[in-house]
Image: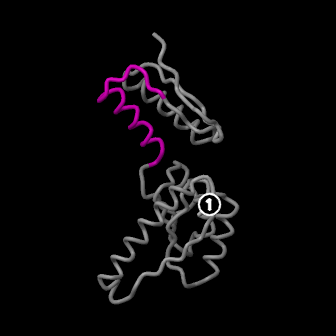
Amino acid sequence: LTGDNANAGQEGLTALNMAIDEFNAAGGYEGHKIVVDTFDDKNDPTEAANIAQQIVSDKKYMAVLGSFASGATMAGAPIYENNIVQLSPTASSTKIPEVGGWTWMMCPDAVFQYSSWARIAVQELNAKTIGMIVIDGDNGALILDTVTKAAKEYGGGNCRRQIYSGTDKGLYLSAPEG
């Protein structure tokens, strides 16, 4: 797999293949083995849409597990609609339910996740300041906004942040002031 989440995608594929091998070794589903075909959308919405067209055109597919990120997942959703169920184990955009009833997130949405981080930091770890390193982009902005807002709602203080461009080297978050 390639693209900016290739390592995570490869780890997920390895885990999926292990589970499928175990399931098939135990007899499969009513004697039928599950076969997994792998496609690489490179975490690119345009490529994800092209692959969705290819999958929908080939009537042998029953379901899609992926894409990894929300943008690629949402790009394929309108194409899968009324054809094939798409399950994303990691996409978490709050907009996914709006793009079609045939695309499902398998994890909590991003706002819930990021608010939970703030709650744990403030209420369970008694953090006075939360430090964050986030990648530059929509998701990074959502993390910053959600954690900052939630930390204040839970009685926390400052959120310090460092924006990561994706190519930065030697990235660090400076110590809180005061």
Image-quadrant location for residue 115? top left
Left or right of 17? Residue 83 is right
| Nearer to the camera, 22 or 113 | 22
Question: What secondary structure do most residues of the magenta stretch adopt?
Answer: helix
- Rendered view: 79 above or below 170: below
Q: Residue at x 65, y 70 (%)?
A: 51
Front-most of residues 54 and 12: 12
Q: Is residue 149 left or right of residue 49?
A: left
Q: Position of residue 17 (x, y in %)?
A: 43, 72
**Residue 39, percent from left and from top:** 59, 70
Q: Where in the figure is residue 2, as x and y percent of width and height? A: 62, 60
Asked if residue 126 is positioned above or below residue 57 in the image, the reply reads: above
Which quadrant is the C terminus positioned in? top left
Tell me if residue 129 comes above or below residue 82 in the rendering: above
Q: Nearer the viewer, residue 61 or 171?
A: 171
**Which quarter of the figure has residue 73?**
bottom right
At x 38% / y 77%, what residue is drawn? 21
Residue assigned mark 1: 2
**Label 1: element kind:** loop
Residue 112: in magenta span: yes
Q: How many residues crowd mark 1 within 10 Å: few (<14), some (14–19), many (20+)?
A: few
Q: Which residues are magenta?
A: 109-131
Identify the residue at the far front of this view. 170
Q: Quadrant of the N terminus?
A: bottom right
Amino acid type, label 1: Thr
Q: Residue at x 29, y 30 (%)?
A: 124
- Furthest-top residue in view? 178
Q: Position of residue 154 (x, y in %)?
A: 37, 26
